[in-house]
Image: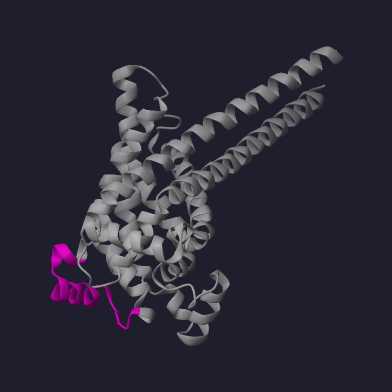
Amino acid sequence: MGTGVQEQRATLTQGEGSYEGLKHTRSVLNSLFSGALAGALAKTAVAPLDRTKIIFQVSSARFSAKEAYRLIYRTYLKNGFLSLWRGNSATMVRVIPYAAIQFCAHEQYKELLGGYYGFQGNVLPPFPRLLAGSMAGTTAAMVTYPLDMVRARMAVTPKEMYSNILHVFVRISREEGLKTLFRGFTPTMLGVIPYAGLSFFTYETLKKLHLERSGRPQPYSYERLAFGACAGLLGQSASYPLDVVRRRMQTAGVTGHTYGTILGTMKEIVSEEGVIRGLYKGLSMNWVKGPVAVGISFTTFDMTQILLRKLHQIRLGNNDTERGKRG
């Protein structure tokens, strides 16, 4: 009799373990899908501004809102409206896995750190909150870096030079070597730590403050957009000089420069263009583009997660109803 009870308990334990495993897998898949959708929508929305910013970042031309407008208008007149999205296919190839991995990793790191610090299921304290964002961004950037390199090349070169994404990979590998695909990797890693860390930290903190002040567990969509905009503004401003440096290093092969190290690149930029006009070139455009993109990204992720959970609950309810009818 004792053996029968033990077997029953073992069966229940296995069932619970299987259910928890299935629940975790579903959570990971939901995060990956929501993150991919969030990244795709956000980047597509600001692609013309992003392309314009990169062109100024990698050149010695002086940046101003007027010159940025002229560049966009000239591109439109010369190559048509869709040319403003040149390189966006490469952006999608990169940003979909990048955003999927980043958001999914953030959820997993929050869970791990929550368990470690004893805050499982609750909002993390400030330092773990910052750490989870930084680790998520670093993980995503490491996995998808060559695609970022390809995207930068496509954004600053004429269509005749690189016909598609595969052509960029082949030509860079043949003419400049495989190592070139990882040029600018170090400044990217150094830049993504404060960028992702501050972005996720700010967004999560604002949601926490909102809950404490309003008592509503779920902010409205426009509130999420505002929280994401603040997160993007802080995160991108903190890491912007390193963003300029990585773009210069990534596009050195087609701009005639030979940027080798982070400090060397910074010194050359400062000596030729100054600190503000060089290392912070295009930042004012980022203050428009960044908050919009990050706001859309965070809001899309949260709303998609909520929608998927509701659909799952509806499906479970329908299954229970079916079982009741059969019974």
In the rendered view, tell whether residue 165 sits above or below residue 118: below
Residue drawn at 35 percent across, 43 percent down: 292
Q: Residue at x 59, y 25 (%)?
A: 310
Residue 124 shows up from this direction: no
Residue 321, image x, y percentages: 76, 15
Q: Is residue 238 above or below residue 149?
A: above
For residue 254, what is the image quadrant?
Answer: bottom left
What percent of the width, then of the height, locates residue 153?
A: 42, 71
Above or below, 263 against 215 in this view is below
For this view, does 19 lie left or right of residue 287?
right
Nearer to me, 20 or 272: 272
In this orientation, which residue lies closer to the viewer: 150 or 18? 150
Q: Relative to the observer, which residue lies in front, 26 or 155?
A: 155
Colouring scheme, one of rainbow, by chain, secondary structure, one colour: one colour
- Residue at image location 71% in from the left, 34% down from the top: 14
Q: Quadrant of residue 56?
A: bottom left
Question: Is residue 5 at all visible to an observer of this figure?
Answer: yes
Image quarter hosting the N terminus: top right
Of 70 and 185, which appears nearest the observer?
70
Write down the region rendered in magenta. Answer: 255-278
Asked if residue 273 is positioned above or below residue 131 in the image, the reply reads below
Query: From the image, which quarter does the C terminus lie in?
Result: top right
Indicate whether residue 77 is drawn in magenta. no
Whole-percent x, y for residue 262 in the image = 26, 73
Instruction: Locate residue 72, reporting x and y percent.
Output: 34, 59
| Residue occupying the far bottom of the picture | 175
Q: Is residue 272 left or right of residue 187?
A: left
Q: Main secondary structure of the magenta part?
A: helix
Task: Indicate whether residue 270 is drawn in magenta.
Answer: yes
Res 29 quadrant in image: top right
Taking the spot 33% from the left edge, 74% from the top edge, the residue there is 249
